[in-house]
Image (cartoon, rainbow, N blue to C red):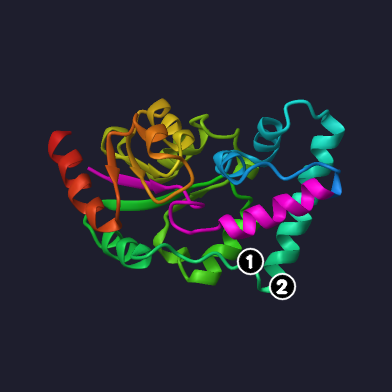
Amino acid sequence: MRRLVVFDVDGTLVDSQGHILAAMEAAFAGCGRPMPPREAALSVVGLSLPVALARLFPDAGEAELGAMAEGYRSAFQRIRLSGAGASPLYPGTREMLAGLSRAPGTLLGLATGKSRRGLDHLLDLHGLAPFFATRQVADDHPSKPHPAMLEAALAETGAERGASVMVGDTAFDLEMGRAAGLRTVAVTWGYHRREMLAGADALIGSWAELPSVLADFAEAA
């Protein structure tokens, strides 16, 4: 049986909040909007950019949302090129990925609200690209929690749905996983509060806990 373990990126594998919040602040200031509180801003991380902005500013019209989106992309790129926006891996991430990638019958994938360009840059920065058999991005799919990313990942890899798992830090990741018929694992170090992750099949506080959770899932399958 071929198992696919799919990871979210921001707030799960990498701590990108500094880069994201700085780009948001620049984009909103350019449109004369105040920066929302930090918790509110981080609560939409993982959604595709247009959906995230519409949640933060439900009174904004289409033109203003478009200007914000363009401002965010420009600021994100500028910060990245300056070298100030490097997003560090969470502790143990590389070792966890290396270990799982050697597990028989296990493939790894990504499902992220990032653009293809942003994801490729991040993978190159940290040397993570070889670990992943499938990479699903916001350019090609509806926003989370729509299950399209996971459906595409399963089709691309030929993995068994019932054996596969979605790992993320937000309720959007969990909802997407459930909608696609995958088991779900929530990490507690990301951008959604612990109480928002109550629907996960398992909750972990470090990567060291993931192998035993996956073993339990496999035994119960």
Q: Quadrant of residue 75?
A: bottom right
Q: Name the residue at 48% across, 51% down.
A: 11
Above or below — where is 162 with respect to 108? Answer: above
In the image, which disc is placed on residue 179?
none
Position of residue 174 measured from the top left corner of the image (x, y, whole percent): 41, 34
Magenta span:
1-29
The reply to whether dot 2 and dot 1 touch (C-beta < 8 Å) is yes
Position of residue 203 measured from the top left corner of the image (x, y, whole percent): 29, 41
205 sits to left or right of 41: left
Q: Quadrant of residue 221?
A: top left
From the viewer's side, name the closer residue of 168 and 129. 168
1 sits to left or right of 122: left
From the viewer's side, name the closer residue of 131 and 92. 92
From the viewer's side, name the closer residue of 102 and 170. 170
Q: Name the residue at 66% across, 73% down.
A: 83
Q: Residues within 10 Å of mark 2 (few under 14, many from 20)?
A: few
The amino acid marked with disc number 2 is Ser
The amino acid marked with disc number 1 is Gly
- Which residue of the protein is positioned furthest toward the left in this rendering? 219
Helix, strand or loop status at disc 1: loop
Position of residue 2 measured from the top left corner of the image (x, y, whole percent): 27, 45
Residue underneath mark 1? 85
Q: Name the residue at 37% across, 65% down.
A: 91
Q: Measure the alpha-carbon separation of dots 2 and 1.
A: 7 Å
Helix, strand or loop status at disc 2: helix
198 sits to left or right of 219: right
Q: Residues within 10 Å of mark 1 (few under 14, many from 20)?
A: some
Residue underneath mark 2? 82
